Every structure is written in structure tokens, then in C-alpha cells.
Image (cartoon, rainbow, N blue to C red):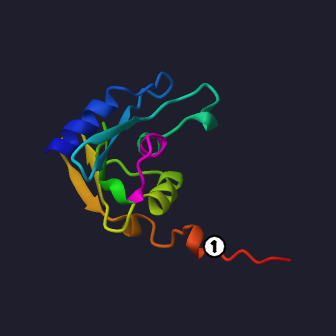
Amino acid sequence: MKNIDQAKAAREKAYAPYSNYRVGAALELNNGEFVHGANIENASFGLSNCAERSAIYSAYSQGYKKNDFKSLTIIANHKKPVSPCGACRQVMYELLPEGCEIILANIKGDQIKFSKEELLPYGFNFEEINIESS
């Protein structure tokens, strides 16, 4: 599967000297191209960034928008398909389009497919925030 191969290639770009837990994400565009993301660790652990957020933020930084995305594949060396953290689930909920397929995988070949709504059923986006003026 091309998505899995792309996610594996992204994983090779990880910077994980502290945990040695390398994660790759491949964001597939509607035009068939991919934007890679890898986890990037930092000695100040809170400043680390996950692979899926790296891919999504990179795509937006390159000028792509929500409707340009087809799927997101995330892979790691894990016993079961890797699961995104809560912060990544919220970012995916807001920045990926409805119907965008999210594939969670491990390097053994196991995979599960979800939608962003299944991963974060009560996520929110800007349109749903009720900002009252005082």
C-alpha cells in the first residue's frame, strides 16, 4: 500500500534521541502527492511535536488547505496500530476535511481505519465555539 510505504519513509525522518520511539505520518493530497511528518523530540519534552501534527502543519505551511487532503496514515513500531494522542486528535478534527480517512498502522503490517469523528467524537472547531461579547 502506497500510504504505508510513505508513512514508513516519513518515520525514517524522526528525531527521537530520548525515547527512540520513531513515528511517521503521510498526509495524502487529493492530487496523489504526500506531505511527510515525523515526531521531533526536544530535551524539554513538552516542546516535542508528534508526526501527525508535523505533517498537517507542514502542509498548511506550504499553502494547502483542508479540502486538499484525502487521507492521513500514521505508523510506528508498536504492538498494535499506533494511536494518536489527544492533541493530535483535536488538530485532525479541526484541520482535516470530513470523510478524510485516517489509517493507524504498525510496521508489522497491522492497520485500522477511522474517520476523525470516530477518533474524537466530541471534538470542536472554530464554527462551534460560541464567543459572547461582553
Quarter of the image where one finds residue 120: bottom left
Q: Which residues are magenta?
A: 56-66
The residue at 46%/46% (across/down) is 60
> What residue would you read off at disc 1?
129
The residue at 44%/40% (across/down) is 62
The residue at 21%/42% (across/down) is 4
Quarter of the image where one finds residue 99: bottom left
Q: Label 1's element?
A: loop
Residue 65, image x, y percentages: 42, 54
Q: Considering the image in quadrants, where does the N terminus appear?
A: top left
Q: Considering the image in quadrants, where does the C terminus appear?
A: bottom right
Residue 51, image x, y percentages: 42, 40
Residue furthest out toward the front: 63
Q: For residue 57: magenta?
A: yes
Q: For residue 64: magenta?
A: yes
Q: Residues within 10 Å of mark 1 (few under 14, many from 20)?
A: few
Residue 32, image x, y percentages: 21, 46
Q: Name the residue type under label 1.
A: Ile
The residue at 33%/65% (across/down) is 115
Q: Left of 31 or right of it: where is 23?
A: right
Compared to residue 22, the image places residue 122 above or below, namely: below
In depth, the one of 64 and 77 nearer the eye is 64
